[in-house]
Image (cartoon, rainbow, N blue to C red):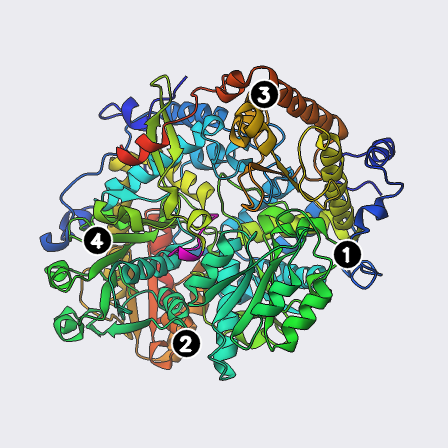
């Protein structure tokens, strides 16, 4: 069989082996002893043609069932302009690697520079990196930054309203490292910052909060930065970046670190990945920022050009003195966000955010009229809200009935927390993409079940 | 020619995208109270205001100022820049995969789960391990995950004195960094005359404070560590674990497995070995494979196959927890699965054999004009030293690299590993044909010839790019990191 993607002919192999001074392909592996060389072939299937693979995948794909998603919790079904897929699929964007060689990577470097700029603009921060893995990992990088920035501080304060998965990723980060998380509890669905003074001590490196939070509720951080800064602790705010078209940005709250995930800005659901984490900081923290960074400079003839810069921060230079180990990031996903934002502009971002707000409130308002379900807290929210049920059986029936209509009604909070007390809470997300018809379909089914 | 930033092309009021009008009942939106002023955003963000064609032309022009594998040979050592099949790209764009939400009920995501489950099975076979996780988003993220499991394993066993990770001094920078971020200390191990792990040095440093030895095999010089079985034995005798960095797995597919070499934990780079595109820096994927010893510590959830289909299993008491927001970079996993289906067992073996053939051929054909410190026989990559050119003509490895750009090649990895002076690390991959390799060899030799005759010319390269070498000091002294 001729294996795909290997261009060698019999004649080529002969010529090459001769040049090397070998007589067979097996001799190429003569450095591996007998007890290491496998005697049998690896037990996976034999190769298939392109057409056979496509048919096989088509058949597997049928076992994925699509519905009208009212699902969120960190992954949202927003409108994505056609430009995003078309342009991010251009082969040189797809098949290049990290732009180490600036002279032949100007296009990629410029796109990353635009990404960094847009993240700074949206978060009202000074400097942003070229991306991190995802929003949860951006939180653990923020925690690492904080701990590295303050001497003898090993505790990171975290809001109990962080996304449960973000919290789990942070817990993994702290595990076995001598660092710890200290929980700031919530009150009526939002972080209770009145506890902050009593929880904050010299061991604390900073605080991580999130808005919209795990329930979809918006939080206020009035005066928080001031309290933290007095103790030389830092404030990190995690956001859904699209919500920043409506709510105050981290910079406006005087945060030191802005983090989040750009999934809501041009990335498909894709079963949760790839998405794209971001981090932006105040200028004073520039040298502590993890990940790649692109800057504008000039060449010997005074021509402007982009290059990777401040590389002395990174693992390939710093090795065992590094504070982050990130190397590969989510560049292509960051490019998709850059194209998305280039297409939408600020007006488009505001439009998407406003429509999501309006449609979510429309659905919430009408659902709250029905018996057996209620909005858990009367607090400001943006595009996602917690719906409380009085009876678990009704909730299951509700989800099943809506599924029968082709609607994914929401995510049960207990799916994320694995806690019994969260079994009666359904998180419902509504984006600008949900049509009036889809909203009415949802409401009609809900009225049937909850009458 | 420089492409102006899109923000510089902006004109107020221009639009590249229009949303459908809000179709709620009359008056609902008007009656809806806005966000309280205390949390409402006041300032606007400066984003481009351009037409759709402006966006299209901007990014299309940018794409012409990039060199990818699709543009030409990309022998960037250690990164395995092999061809990324178009079939994988096509499949990764199917709605059945891109429009699935990670928190849908598992009964509606059996297709995606079966791909992940079967990919893990294949990766287990390929690495000679038994279990694994697909959550890590990149190689370094896999290292982080694998070492976190090592750390947790020793804590569970009460061996908290195991605080060190031994790492050959030639290792990738991510190795020591991943050890440090997990709270370990790093102890470097030296190399012997053959460019392999120095057993005496290893012996001297191995004691009961060592948690693991972290190795790449073949190592970063492209040399197979021939003492690997003896090394595993020594390490295990001390109660320590063996960690395999899969960066160079493309050399041994179907020929040997980390499992048979005695490794306890392995991370792979799907974007290297399994042909998923590098995307200008990512997303990659860094699955971690383990044997029975470390299985309890794998991240959760795990995927199980039950009578009612695939399920996500969260009931894992000793798990290190989650390392990613959801289940990993699914669309990257999908591409790798497609690649494995296409190649099959023999195809993968053939890929490695030809990767090794190509590297040996180029090494042989360059060996007479530049120094290859540890000999011309190599695995899938090799490292040359241009020290003699620096001493005799003042031409450095970087200069040769930049001159290659003018010939249409992406330069090899420069100045790594650090135990070779003026190093260039060349990894042709199996994708390149004999003709392409011959052209590359010819170009490389002519540059070396030119370095002798007209060193100043080579030191001024590249000449054909939109810009020349950039002032990196200025980039740091006068940082301009955003518009």
Residue tagged 3: B451
Name the chain under label 4. A
Horizontal arrangement in the rendering, residue B359 relative to residue B4 (left or right): right
Residue tagged 4: A256
Residue B158 in percent (x, y) is at 49, 84
Residue B342 in percent (x, y) is at 72, 47
Q: Residue furthest bottom?
A: B158
Q: Nearer the viewer, residue B433 or B377?
A: B377
Q: Which of the 4 image quarters holds residue A117?
A: top left
Name the chain under label 3. B
Cβ atoms at labels 4 and 2 below 8 Å apart: no
Q: Residues within 10 Å of mark 2 (few under 14, many from 20)?
A: some
Element at label 2: loop
User: Magenta segment: does it hold A321?
Assistant: yes
User: In terms of sequence position, does the residue under pointer 1 or pointer 2 come before the other?
Assistant: 1
The range drawn in magenta is A320-328
* Separation of marks 4 and 2 at Cα, in angstroms: 32 Å
* Label disc, if present, on residue A418 of the rendered structure: 2
């Amino acid at each position: 069989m001729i294996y795909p993607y290997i261009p060698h002919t019999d004649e080529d192999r002969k010529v090459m082996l001769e040049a090397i001074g070998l007589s067979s392909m097996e001799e190429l592996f003569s450095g591996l002893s007998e007890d290491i060389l496998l005697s049998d072939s690896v037990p996976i299937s034999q190769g298939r043609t392109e057409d056979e693979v496509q048919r096989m995948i088509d058949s597997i794909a049928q076992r994925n069932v699509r519905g009208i998603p009212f699902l969120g919790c960190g992954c949202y079904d927003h409108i994505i302009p056609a430009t995003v897929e078309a342009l991010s699929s251009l082969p040189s964007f797809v098949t290049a690697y990290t732009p180490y060689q600036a002279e032949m990577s100007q296009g990629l470097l410029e796109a990353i520079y635009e990404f960094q700029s847009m993240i700074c603009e949206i978060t009202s921060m000074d400097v942003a990196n070229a991306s991190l893995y995802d929003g949860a990992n951006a939180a653990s990088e923020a925690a690492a930054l904080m701990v590295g920035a303050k001497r003898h501080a090993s505790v990171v304060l975290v809001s109990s309203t962080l996304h449960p998965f973000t919290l789990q990723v942070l817990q993994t980060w702290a595990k076995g490292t001598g660092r710890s998380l200290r929980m700031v509890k919530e009150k009526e669905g939002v972080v209770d910052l009145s506890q902050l003074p009593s929880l904050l001590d010299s061991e604390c490196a900073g605080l991580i909060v999130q808005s919209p939070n795990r329930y979809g509720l918006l939080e206020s951080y009035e005066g928080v930065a001031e309290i933290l800064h007095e103790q030389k602790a830092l404030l990190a705010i995690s956001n859904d970046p699209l919500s920043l078209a409506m709510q105050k940005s981290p910079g406006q709250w005087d945060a030191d670190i802005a983090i989040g995930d750009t999934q809501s800005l041009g990335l498909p659901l894709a079963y949760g990945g790839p998405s794209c984490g971001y981090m932006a900081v105040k200028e004073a923290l520039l040298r502590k920022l993890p990940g790649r960074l692109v800057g504008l400079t000039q060449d010997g003839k005074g021509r402007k050009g982009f290059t990777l810069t401040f590389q002395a921060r990174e693992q390939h230079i710093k090795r065992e003195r590094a504070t982050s180990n990130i190397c590969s990031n989510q560049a292509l996903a960051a490019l998709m966000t850059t194209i998305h934002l280039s297409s939408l502009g600020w007006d488009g971002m505001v439009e998407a955010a406003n429509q999501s707000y309006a449609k979510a409130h429309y659905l919430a308002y009408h659902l709250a009229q029905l018996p057996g379900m209620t909005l858990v807290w009367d607090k400001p929210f943006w595009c996602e809200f917690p719906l409380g049920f009085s009876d678990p059986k009704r909730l299951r029936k509700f989800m099943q009935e809506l599924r029968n209509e082709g609607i994914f009604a929401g995510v049960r909070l207990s799916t994320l927390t694995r806690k019994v007390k969260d079994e009666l809470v359904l998180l419902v997300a509504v984006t600008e993409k949900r049509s009036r018809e889809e909203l009415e379909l949802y409401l009609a089914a809900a009225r049937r079940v909850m009458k | 020619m420089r492409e102006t930033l899109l923000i510089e092309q902006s004109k107020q009021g221009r639009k590249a995208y229009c949303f459908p009008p809000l179709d709620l009942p009359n008056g609902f939106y008007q009656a809806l109270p806005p966000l309280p002023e205390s949390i409402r955003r006041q300032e606007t963000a400066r984003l481009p205001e351009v037409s759709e064609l402006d966006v299209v032309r901007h990014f299309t022009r940018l794409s012409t100022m990039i060199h990818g594998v699709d543009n030409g040979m990309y022998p960037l050592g250690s990164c395995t820049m092999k061809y990324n099949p178009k079939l994988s790209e096509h499949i990764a764009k199917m709605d059945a995969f891109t429009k699935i939400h990670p928190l849908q009920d598992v009964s509606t995501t059996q297709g995606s789960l079966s791909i992940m489950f079967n990919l893990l099975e294949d990766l287990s076979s390929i690495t000679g391990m038994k279990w694994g996780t697909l959550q890590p988003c990149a190689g370094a993220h896999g290292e982080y995950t694998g070492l976190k499991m090592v750390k947790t394993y020793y804590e569970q066993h009460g061996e908290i004195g195991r605080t060190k990770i031994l790492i050959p001094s030639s290792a990738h920078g991510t190795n020591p960094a991943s050890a440090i971020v997990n709270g370990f200390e790093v102890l470097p191990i030296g190399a012997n005359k053959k460019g392999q792990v120095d057993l005496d040095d290893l012996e001297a440093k191995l004691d009961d404070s060592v948690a693991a030895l972290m190795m790449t095999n073949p190592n970063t010089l492209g040399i197979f560590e021939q003492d690997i079985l003896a090394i595993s034995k020594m390490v295990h005798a001390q109660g320590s674990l063996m960690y395999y960095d899969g960066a160079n797995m493309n050399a041994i597919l179907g020929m040997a497995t980390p499992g048979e070499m005695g490794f306890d934990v392995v991370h792979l780079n799907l974007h290297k070995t399994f042909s998923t595109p590098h995307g200008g820096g990512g997303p990659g994927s860094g699955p971690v494979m383990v044997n029975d010893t470390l299985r309890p510590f794998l991240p959760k959830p795990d995927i199980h196959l039950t009578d009612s289909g695939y399920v996500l299993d969260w009931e894992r008491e000793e798990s290190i927890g989650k390392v990613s927001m959801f289940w990993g970079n699914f669309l990257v996993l999908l591409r790798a699965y497609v690649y494995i289906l296409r190649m099959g067992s023999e195809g993968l073996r053939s890929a490695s054999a030809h990767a090794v053939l190509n590297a040996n051929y180029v090494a042989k054909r360059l060996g007479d004009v530049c120094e290859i410190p540890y000999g011309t026989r190599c695995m899938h990559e090799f490292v040359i030293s241009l020290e003699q050119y620096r001493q005799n003509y003042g031409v450095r490895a970087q200069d040769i690299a930049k001159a290659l750009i003018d010939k249409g090649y992406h330069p090899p990895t420069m100045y790594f590993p650090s135990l070779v002076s003026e190093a260039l690390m060349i990894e042709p991959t199996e994708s390149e044909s004999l003709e392409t390799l011959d052209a590359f060899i010819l170009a490389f030799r002519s540059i070396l010839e030119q370095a002798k005759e007209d060193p100043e010319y080579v030191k001024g390269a590249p000449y054909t790019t939109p810009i020349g070498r950039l002032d990196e000091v200025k980039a740091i002294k006068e940082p301009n990191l955003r518009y």
